[in-house]
Image (cartoon, rainbow, N blue to C red):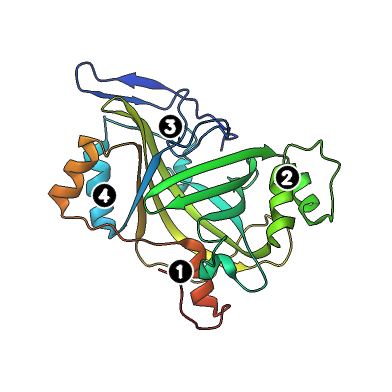
Amino acid sequence: MSDLSDTTEGAAFALSGSGYTASARGLESPSLFNPAAGADSATAYEVKFLLTEEQAAEVVARVTGKLALDPYADPALGNAYITTSVYTDTPNFDVFYRTEGYDRDKFRVRRYGLTGPVFVERKTKNGDKVRKHRVRISASEVPDLAAPELNGEWAGEWFHSQLLQKQLRPVCRVAYERVAYLGTADGGTVRLTFDRNIRGVLAGEWKLEAVGPVPALVDKVVTEFKFRTAMPALFKGIVADLGLTPTPVSKYRTFVHAAGLAPVRTVNA
């Protein structure tokens, strides 16, 4: 599989007069923002659905010719690529319980592919609104996140600083196979992802090793529609015609529940 980069590049084609551009060249996920972007301009939405394989196939049929398959798709994996993330939380699982001050942000380290690029990432979520900031680091630098202090010259220093300030440490490593589509609709960038075989293991160290054959956490296809400002007509039509209902689902929270890591108590809504 080809190496992945911050900005997806690949073959492009356009459907004249259709309102869609099925192109992955030069586009980024709608939820990625430069930290300098103002709060008002940094708005994106991620709407999730739990679909059967039959429903997922119908969605793919609806976007074929309108959105481009991710150019880094691996035909050997059914046009998917493996995504592996290390999720963090405090010893008291404040992120999981959405304790005040921990209720909107998730800090994670993510690798695309088995040997692809690695990013440190903060994901901020408010309802369906999402904002992500990430910086690429080398795989060899991941263990440095365990250091009590750094020299301040590293690209991931901001992430490391947040780990220390919020007392975050690795909790689990979650992996899945993702099929992604990217393009433009109604004048804005859109992304559509299908995540399968979501699995996880405990992770007390900063390592991005592959997650072996363990039972899947979800028995359906986790599907996300990602877009800026307003859901495009392409996605609205799919939701209406197939009668889809949004279903909030968190890979991290699903793992913590399945592993019985956090004591039962009331979780903030």
Q: Amino acid at mark 4?
A: Ala
Q: Which residue is mark 2?
A: 139
Crowding at label 3, few (<14), some or many (≥20) Cα neighbours within 10 Å? Answer: few
Residue 215 point in image, percent of width and height: 49, 72
The label nearer to you, 3 versus 1, is: 3
Q: Against 16, is 133 above or below?
A: below
Q: Which residue is mark 4?
A: 57
Relative horizontal placement of residue 51, taking residue 27 as reference (left or right):
left
Q: Which residue is mark 1?
A: 217
Crowding at label 2, few (<14), some or many (≥20) Cα neighbours within 10 Å? Answer: some
Residue under the point 45% across and 70% down: 268
Q: Amino acid at mark 2?
A: Ala
Q: Amino acid at mark 3?
A: Ser
Residue under the point 47% across and 52% down: 177
Q: Against 261, is 139 above or below?
A: above
Residue 118 point in image, percent of width and height: 65, 43
- Please report contact status of discs 2 and 4: CB closer than 8 Å, yes or no: no
The label nearer to you, 3 versus 4, is: 3
N-terminal label among 3 and 4: 3
